[in-house]
Structures are given as C-alpha cells and as structure tokens.
Image (cartoon, rainbow, N blue to C red):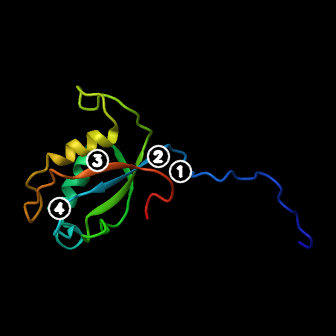
Amino acid sequence: MSGGITKQNPTLANVSRNFNGRTIMGFTIDLAVNGTNFASTEMGPTGAVQAVLDVLRRNVTVIAMSALRTDGSNAGQMFDIMVEGQYGQDTYDGTNNETLAEFLETEIRTLTSVGVGSVNLNAALVTNTTGFPYLA
C-alpha cells in the first residue's frame, strides 16, 4: 500500500497500564534472612520460597512472580509478585484494619521454621510496589 494511512488516534497517556483486563497490584517480598541465598537453597517443593507462595496463594491470586534478587547485600532475598485485584484497608484477619501488605507480612512472619534449612521468616517484609514494571 503506497502512502498508507497515518494513524492519528488514540494517543496514549504516559501512565502505567496492564492489558489483561484485570486490576492488578504489585508487592515486594523481602525474606530478610541474612546469609541465606533462597535462590540456591530454598526453591524446591519443600523449600521456604514454596511455603511463602502457599501463604500468598491462600490469600490472593498471584499472576506473576519475579526471580529472586539481592536486597543490596545478600543474594536471593527479595522477589516481586503481581496479584489480581485492588485491595485497600480492610480487616483481612477478621480483627485489625490493615493494608493487604501488612496482612501478608503478618502471615509470612508466622513461618518460623520452614524449608530445607528450617528458615525463620519472622522478620520478612512486604511492601506495595509502585510504578512499572513490577518485575524488575
């Protein structure tokens, strides 16, 4: 087609978006166990990462997960997830009014002896991920 048609619309706004037709949220999970590289020791079916994913899946629909990465000084400590839905403050545990990140953090912190190395995740952190891409 010689000359062709020059497309004029739509012009996209410079904002983050997804194209799966669902509302999504992102979270960063920091397992916070210095000296444990979860990527090399805790990825198997009985590993601590699987235990964390089980907690997450009981509470949200996880649609994507990043690879584990360094927290800046310890390899294999952090990962990001994207979940389906938009969650504000609520009484997720039936008692406290809290954010979903706070609730998930509390749930993960109950894992005090999990995985092949009996890892204690009582210092794990969950934060909302803002911006895009979620999976760095």
**Chain-order first, disc 4 or disc 3:** 4
Within 10 Å of the Cα at label 4, are there few (<14), some (14-19), or many (20+) other Cα atoms?
some
CA separation, marks 4 and 1? Answer: 34 Å
Residue 33 — which label? 4
Q: Secondary structure at mark 1?
A: loop
CA separation, marks 3 and 2? Answer: 15 Å
* Figure quadrant of the C terminus: bottom left
| Residue marked by disc 1 | 20
**Chain-order first, disc 2 or disc 4:** 2
Which residue type does callout 1 highlight? Asn
Q: Nearer the viewer, mark 4 or mark 1?
A: 4
**Chain-order first, disc 4 or disc 1:** 1
Nearer to us in this view, 46 or 36: 36
CA separation, marks 2 and 1? Answer: 9 Å
Residue 57 — which label? 3
Please tell me in which quadrant of the rendered image residue 107 appears.
Answer: top left
